Image (cartoon, rainbow, N blue to C red):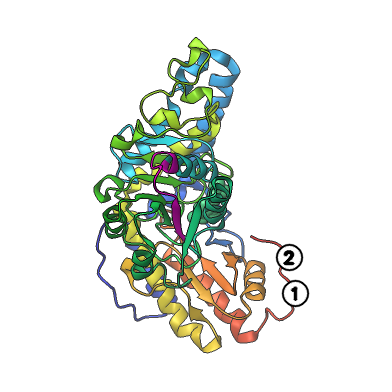
Amino acid sequence: MVTVDRVVWIPADRAYAESLDAGDPLAKFRDCFVLPSDDASEPLIYLDGNSLGPLPRATVEQIAHVVGSQWGAGLVRSWNTWIDLPRQTGDLIGAHLIGAAPGQTLVCDSTTVNLFKLVSAALDAQPGRTVLVTDDDNFPTDRYVLQGITAQRGCELRLIRTDMDLGLSEDALLAALGPDVALVCLSHVAYRSGALAAMARITGLVHEAGALMLWDLCHSAGSVPVELDASGADMAVGCSYKYLNAGPGSPAFLYVRAELTDLLRQPVWGWFGQADQFAMGPVYDPVPGIERFATGTPQVIGTVAVAEGVRLLAEAGIERLRTKGVALTSYLIHLADHWLDPHGFRLASPRADARRGSHVTLYHPDAWRINQALIRAGVVGDYRTPDRLRLGPVPIVTRFTDVWDALDRLRQIAEHRSYEDQPAERTRVT
Ligand SMILES: Cc1ncc(COP(=O)(O)O)c(C=O)c1O
């Protein structure tokens, strides 16, 4: 992981943000995306790429090619081109974003389904160990999948108490470990606060207890450097519609450490995980290697979008993205401290740069109404329960002036209490 020196940000005038944009080595990447026009009188500021990333222009062209030429003209013959895409795209993610040597990463299914497959396989591989561990603030789908698996099998789910703003306590994790634990499943970057877990150290603690470690990378892949091989992680899952910019519902990825792959057997016995798939044999016999974690026919168009998204991130470079991510989020925190604290806001993310991913969360008792007012003012972030505003300045497209303008609009909303006309009832999740 890169270490980024803490910069002391002093000036709060917009000219300073402009000077940061002028010196930004990643500035040119903004033009690689389809974004709402900057020409409007009050241009839209998008701080929600950590929920749904923007559309790369290259993806529009590449999908048009795949649909028009490969599907349209090539028809079923194009499967020769498509069949290896999930593994090839997995290797691309492995090489550029998650520190995984080839042959350990596969693009397939959704994060939720991949969690189910890997957690089930980990339990089956360790018959004497019947406890799964996660934290009580992990993303809902992770907790629900583990709840479902333990309910089906009569196993135990052990939940670690976690501070929702500061992230996981390693002491609490240690207290939950024991000879009965099969697997620990944690998020590398917490979805609400952005708290960044110490992957290598935590993986080491879990291994000392004899358990396997599975990381959820949804909020870290593409935003912070991830070193799965070097940290000794056993398994990982992640989505591609956030920082990988592959679009709504694009397929997820999974990682299994090479030495473990052939020892594990996942529970969805589909024909794409079968050895000699087109022999159409009578019995399921999983293919050696990472492809045994495939299930059915891959989503070709979605996988093409993942590859395009990853290519752009690779060109930008994960170290440079991280450096800019730290600079953007610490700038945002600096402005929030000065402008918003007097209006009842409080930082609900770790303050230390090394402990934070690429988004920042602010607590305010009226966060729901403020977020609605902010959307009306042309700034899209999101609301997260309880009473939190989550702002994601994704490094590949966000400018320092976007952060300045967004916080300026937020300051005005707070100062004039112009959110008070918004309904207090929460109506939908953005
Ligand atoms: C940490 C984390 N895990 C999992 C998911 C979602 O999984 P899926 O892609 O299956 O909806 C999200 C979605 O926001 C997430 O933030």
Q: Three-letter amino acid code at disc 2?
A: Thr
Q: Which mark is residue 423?
A: 1
Camera-side residue of 376 and 340 = 340
Front one among 224 and 415:
224
Looking at the image, is 78 positioned above or below residue 404?
above
Compared with 392, 291 (above or below) is above
- Magenta residues span 122-134
Residue 252 vertical position relative to residue 394 in the rendered view, above or below: above
Q: Which of the two residues, 245 or 236, is positioned nearer the viewer here?
A: 236
Q: Amino acid at mark 1?
A: Pro
Q: Position of residue 265 (x, y in %)?
A: 43, 32
Left or right, 53 with respect to 168, comes to right
The residue carrying pointer 2 sits among few (fewer than 14), some (14 to 19) or many (20 or more) residues within 10 Å by Cα, namely few
Some atom of ligand 1 lies within 8 Å of the CB belonging to the residue at label 1: no
Q: Which residue is mark 2?
A: 427
Q: What element does badge 2 sit on?
A: loop
Image location of residue 96, percent across then percent down? 32, 43
In this orientation, which residue lies closer to the viewer: 11 or 99? 99
Marks 2 and 1, how far apart at CA: 9 Å
Say whether marks 2 and 1 touch (CB < 8 Å): yes
Q: Residue furthest front?
A: 128
Percent across and percent down for residue 63 are 54, 31
- 199 left or right of 421? left
Identity of the residue drawn at 32% across and 51% down? 226
Q: Secondary structure at mark 1?
A: loop
Image quadrant assignment for residue 44: bottom right
